[in-house]
Image: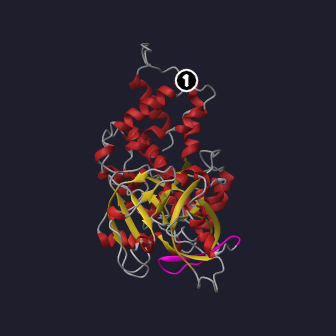
Amino acid sequence: MPDFTEKIRAHVVTVNTGSGVLIQPADADFTYILTAKHVIETAKNSGVYFSAEEIVVTKYNGEVIALQDRRICAVTDLAVIISNDRLDAEVQPAISKPQREDRVLYYGYPQTRRGTNQEDRLREYGGEVTENPENSFTLMLDGQPEWAEVAGSSGGGVFKIIGEDIFLYGVESRVEGAVGREFHGKVVCSSMSAVESLIEKEGIPKIYPVAMSSFIGLVERSFEYYNRTELPDNLNYLKGKLHDLANNLGLAGSVSPLDLYHKFRSGLLIRNSLAQDLYSTDLWISYLEYLIISCLIDDVQNIDVAYVNDNNSRRRFLYSADKGVWARRLMDIFRSDFRGLKRKGKVVISTGDISANMQVMKPTLDGIVPNIGRSDASELMVDAGITNPAKEFDVYHLTGLHRECILRNEHDLAKYYAGNDAPGYGPDDLMTLVRSLYSEHI
């Protein structure tokens, strides 16, 4: 698992005598600093708040952030401060509601550490969610620290690690109980749903992962599986040509991950997957690969909503961040949303199974067919006339497709390279070959 320390340090800031956390709206030339509104109050319980010019926000490295505005929530102990400039903020917002017993990490700058070495000022508090009412949640902090050990951390970020990603669950608001009498190491936090409500009420840009703003920024990260060749440079030329194809599909002005998120939502996920998977960058990189391959097969030069809809009626993309053996998710796969997918449609799966076969073995599939056939009709999401999706649709794993179509042919594909003037080895010939390899299956 990656070390998230440096990433968190880059995002958790001091806000006057409290703390805060940076997060980036998907389409904006500024950044938000989320915090508890009481840390920017001019006097305790006054209901009067410092202006942006009077608020001092400082990063871990000592850099002071220039500010232009702040928005105060009338309902919750929450404020959104807006920076002058767009900052390097990559942490992703949580889409899932915190659940009881979830393990989380809370970060802030307690007053007791403000005068210490820079490396020691930021403190991590491990904790567990004990309550999760609407728009808030309560944490029991490990070791039940005293109030003085937490004071100054108000407004700090609460993070949840899922797989190899870290997501912002919300910001800390206050300690639970009366200080000096009944504080037992619990803190109350505002959830991301409260943040979203404030942002919507104020009419300012919403928060989505930056990667969801455009496919263009994901092109260079696509087809990384091709790097698993026996010889490292064998498929570099092919990758470059597929990236060129992607950049010429009009992705900048047509459809974005955010558009598709709003269009399909949970329809992009294998059934019983975490809603948080919709914010996974891996999902959108995989979908981009699927889209590029589909365009190559269909000889489409420009992507628009009409093509996405047409492609979705013939092929269906489904994702899960699950790193287990994908064949063990067949029941979930066939109970996913196939509405609008025509008979004999192709289903392309992407999961965290890096050793995935292109298709499940026939005995495995044969064992699933009766179970799906016995399912209650309400459990299946298919069009009228389709009774058993396990018999109607062919299912392929994207990783297995790459292995079967490309890696198994790497030495033939390596014969195509820049400067090869031999007849039949030009860029168009290469794309024709790749088209034929993938179209044999999907």
- Residue at far front of view: 115
Mark 1 residue element: helix
| Res 271 seen here | yes
Q: Where is residue 97 in the image (x, y as percent from the top left)?
A: 52, 71
Side (left or right) of 204 relative to 370: left
Q: Position of residue 311 (x, y in %)?
A: 38, 50
The answer to whether 154 is drawn above or below residue 325 in the figure is below
The answer to whether 376 is drawn above or below residue 387 in the figure is below
Render colour scheme: secondary structure
Q: Where is residue 31 in the image (x, y as percent from the top left)?
A: 38, 56
* Nearest to the observer: residue 124 or residue 219: 124
| Amino acid at the residue labelled 1 | Asp
The tally of labels here is 1
27 in the magenta segment: no
Residue at screen point 44% across, 30% down: 240
Query: Residue 369, located in which quarter of the rendered image?
Result: bottom right
* Nearest to the observer: residue 25 or residue 83: 83
Query: Residue 227, located in which quarter of the rendered image?
Result: top right
Report crowding for label 1: few under 14, some 14 to 19, many 20 or more residues within 10 A (C-alpha).
Answer: few
Residue at screen point 49% across, 55% down: 11
137 in the magenta segment: yes
| Res 205 seen here | no
- Residue at far top of view: 422
Residue at screen point 43% across, 34% down: 242
Side (left or right) of 383 relative to 107: left
* Nearest to the observer: residue 62 or residue 172: 62
Q: Name the residue under label 1.
A: 412
Find the magenta span and give its range.
130-143
Q: Position of residue 201 (x, y in %)?
A: 32, 73
